Image (cartoon, rainbow, N blue to C red):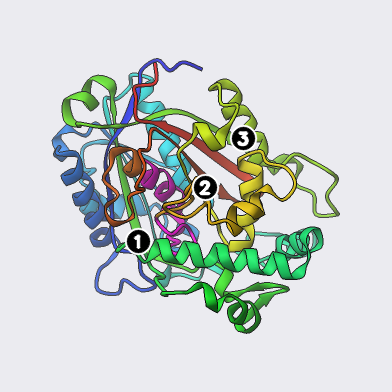
Amino acid sequence: MKKNRNVGVIGVGQSKYSSHREEVNQPEMIHEAVVAALNHSGITLDDVDCIVHGNMELFEMVHQPDLWHTLGTGSYGKETLRVTTGGTTGATLVAVADQLVASGLHDVVMAIGFEKLQEGHTTGGITNMADPLWARQLQTGALTGMTAADVIEEFGEQRAKMASMKYRIIMDKHAMKNDKAHRRLGLEFDQAEDLAKNSPALVGELRMIHMCSQSDGACVMIFASEEKAKQFCKQPAWIKDHVTVHREESFCIFGEPDYVTSHRYAAEKLFGRNGITDPLNQIDMFEMYDPSSWWGLDWIREFLMLEGDSHIKMIENGDICIDGKFPINPSGGVTASNPIGATAMVRVAEAALQIMGDAGEHQIPKPVNQAMASGFGGTMWTVLFLLTKDVPW
């Protein structure tokens, strides 16, 4: 799996994430992140060869918004690609940018992910994508109580509910350290039982407090070849490898047989070809796409290839805290900020910032030499990244 060229992240820029960014239009909001990324990398637009742009255009109802956004992206006269793969869009943007540089086609590529969800109807867009007869099980859109029901059945109601709420409160404590985050609620652990009981119910045991929100915001990452990365950046975050897995062609609405989840399958592939036999000790942190705290706690087991209740114990023992043994989402994760077209990119961007030592108040206190980041969306579509501090090859 050796690349043609090593690729490093040399700049990251993010707008502030919020439920409503009514003071700016889409190009202006994106421009905030573009300027921040250029400033972080120390380069100018003249150094950028290609721009990769993506969002869920269905949600804002603006066709090919990259053409309009030229005003904010600086893409005029440059090669530009547009990518959309649902909830995984941000991760796919990173994969495409990485491949454009690794291939030798371009030396410096800027990837832009965004969403301005206040201008559209996200749930309406999701539910109207599915056939109303054959896809009835999908008509709740992104909301499902199945994961909560499965975790409760396996580990018991009290333990499962408390683990889910502790995970959510840890994520909020991380978000409180991140001034870009949308939901910064100031939750405390002694509120867990009350929140689990009184937060408004969405579906089954999935409650409002568990679920991610709709956020406006943009994320920009700048990728460079090894030669350019070393020229421009003191400490790049190197993209060592990434894997994309999905079950789109075999997604079943009439009951699921036993299967390996796309998360675990992606982890098996990524770990196998990179010599990772003990992820908890060989990887220093994980930025995970966690649409709700129920999914977050369940998916720890899949991504880290754990068995039994090891993942529950990690939450109960505080191992996933920013100062714990295996920090997860020091940025606050998806439950804190969810600008859909950028959400999966934010996971990779935040992992890169941890390696670069530029995460600010939510920088992990221990050294970060190897990090993992994931994206998720649609019909069990997973993208998994491995980033390193040292040049991979």
Which segment is the magenta one?
331-351
* Mark identifier at residue 266: 3
- Please, what is the three-letter code of the amino acid marked with disc 2? Thr
Nearer to the camera, 17 or 139 = 17
Give neighbour class at mark 3: few <14, some 14-19, many 20+ (Cα, 10 Å): many
The CA distance from mark 3 to mark 1 is 28 Å
Compared across the picture, whether 73 is left or right of 292 comes to: left
Which of the 4 image quarters holds residue 197?
A: bottom right
Nearer the observer, 221 or 294: 294
Q: CA distance from mark 2 to mark 3?
A: 14 Å
Please identify, in this view, whether the residue under mark 2 or under mark 3 is nearer the observer. Answer: 3
- Horizontal arrangement in the rendering, residue 270 relative to residue 154 (left or right): left
- Disc marking residue 3: none
Dot in front, 3 or 1: 3
> Vertical placement of 79 versus 348: above or below?
above
Residue under the point 36% across and 17% down: 5
Residue hosting label 1: 217
Q: Which residue is painted at 56% across and 34% down in the image?
A: 279
In percent of width and height, residue 196 lies at: 63, 77
Estimate the x, y position of residue 149 in percent, counting from the top left: 76, 65
Crowding near pointer 2: few (<14 within 10 Å), some, many (20+)? many
Residue type, numbered disc 1: Gly
* Helix, strand or loop under label 2: loop
Residue 337 shown in magenta: yes
**Which residue is most to the front?**
317
Q: Which residue is mark 2?
A: 88
